[in-house]
Amino acid sequence: MLKYFKFNLFMHEDGAAVSGDSAAAEGQADSLAEQTAEGGETKVSEVDTAKEYQDFKNKYKNEIKADMQKVIDRRFAKSKEAETRLKEQEGVMNLLHQRYGTRSIEALYEALENDENYIEKRALELGMTREQAQLYDKMEREIQMYKALNEQNEAERQRDEQVRKWIDEGNALKAKYPEFDLETELQSEGFAAQLRAGVPVELAYKTAHFDELMQSNTAYTAQQTQKAVTENIRARGTRPAENGSSAKSGFTTSKDVSKFTAKDFADIDKRLARGEKVTFK
């Protein structure tokens, strides 16, 4: 099973020190910033990181507060939903307890199971005796519980199978892109959302890192093109003239081939295509 790692940074909104030893920390920071005389000049021995950190918190106080609020909102969103559902269920339970005069779940369950009015109505609907109707309802409840358990087990099996598939796809993708790391990518909600929507791991990764991969592919293509042109130039430069062919105008350059630009290679390739002889000094 994959493990998901999330890192949360907590900062005081008022910029106060985290521990009670703030005075000692400030004293240590001051001692690191002591000046030493060398050749009549003074310099700071160490950077006052404590002061820089304090300045950072003061400067971005509102931004830090907004980020923390987002973290809190996300963390408690599901809790609020669960709390709302619980209050709704409590209202129904209170109504049932009031109607049957019960105080505990066990007593309420027994009262519902032996509700005479319901049993008589159910027996008429099914064309059974009261005892048969009670037994029928009990068996029906057990079947529903069994189906719910099977559905839960099947959902867990499918989830585990999907995770294993993602891992296999991730291992195959890492062979193509060594910098790829599945657990790191899963920390991105956008990447994880694509996987949940059924998008393959490779496509989700390429979508999330489109710009980076395009730059890498462009650089690789340019490198391969330059290599091919260089080899083409060298091959044509060493090829013997064919019998009966007249030599056309030539082109001589003393520029180092290793310093050629893409434009230089393209120009020379055009000259060679026209039959010109290219000579390197």
Image: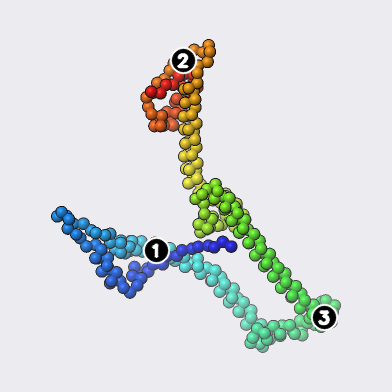
Estimate the x, y position of residue 189 in percent, counting from the top left: 52, 58
Does residue 123 appear to the left or right of 10 in the view shown? right
- The C terminus appears in which quarter of the rendering? top left
Residue drawn at (65%, 65%) of the image: 156
Does residue 162 appear to the left or right of 69 in the view shown? right
Disc 2 marks which residue?
Answer: 248
Task: Using the rendered image of the protein, determine whether residue 57 is visible from the camera's viewpoint.
Answer: yes
Secondary structure under the numbered disc 3 in the rendered image: helix
Q: Residues under labels 1 and 2: Cα distance?
A: 72 Å
In terms of sequence position, does the residue under pointer 1 or pointer 3 come before the other?
Answer: 1
Three-letter residue code for mark 2 = Lys
Which of the pair 30/110 is nearer the observer?
30
Disc 3 marks which residue?
Answer: 132
Residue drawn at (60%, 79%) of the image: 90
Residue drawn at (28%, 71%) of the image: 24
Q: Residues under labels 2 and 3: Cα distance?
A: 108 Å
Tag shown at residue 128: none
Three-letter residue code for mark 3 = Gln
